[in-house]
Amino acid sequence: MVQAYILIQTEVGKAAAVAAEISGAPGVVSAEDVTGPYDVIVRAEAENVDLLGKMVVANIQNVEGITRTLTCPVVHL
């Protein structure tokens, strides 16, 4: 299982709607509004890196109001 944090920037005033829509997407563990350089932080998981990438492109980047995403896979050192 691969886990990742997905940092999302949204259009002004869209963070709450984006987080609400993403929270129901397959593979999303949590989606929360935050302050700072990013507007929403998502915790997601998938069976492998390829499926994680497909999930981000198909289920997250297509949400209206998102301007940029940054996917940060969790590593266990």
Image (spheres, rainbow, N blue to C red):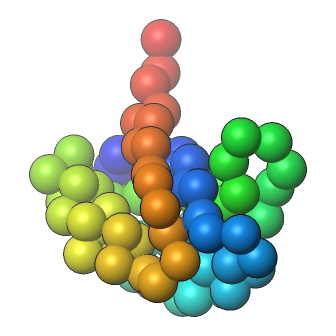
Give the left or right position of residue 68, taking residue 19 as reference: left
Position of residue 70 measured from the top left corner of the image (x, y, whole percent): 44, 43
Position of residue 43 measured from the top left corner of the image (x, y, whole percent): 57, 56
Which residue ends up furthest to the left in the rendered image?
A: 50
Residue 39 visible:
yes
Q: Is residue 53 above or below residue 14?
A: above
Q: Quadrant of residue 29?
A: bottom right
Q: Is residue 17 above or below residue 66?
A: below
Q: Residue at x 53, y 77 (%)?
A: 65
Q: Residue at x 51, y 51 (%)?
A: 6
Position of residue 35 measured from the top left corner of the image (x, y, whole percent): 85, 50
Q: Nearer the viewer, residue 74 or 8?
A: 8
Which residue ends up furthest to the front in the rendered image?
A: 12
Q: Nearer the viewer, residue 57 or 67?
A: 67
Image label count = 0
Give the left or right position of residue 29, taking residue 70 as reference: right
Residue 15 visible:
no
Q: Nearer the viewer, residue 74 or 39?
A: 39
Give the left or right position of residue 53, taking residue 18 as reference: left
Q: Quadrant of residue 73?
A: top left
Position of residue 72 measured from the top left corner of the image (x, y, whole percent): 45, 36
Q: Is residue 51 above or below residue 35?
A: below
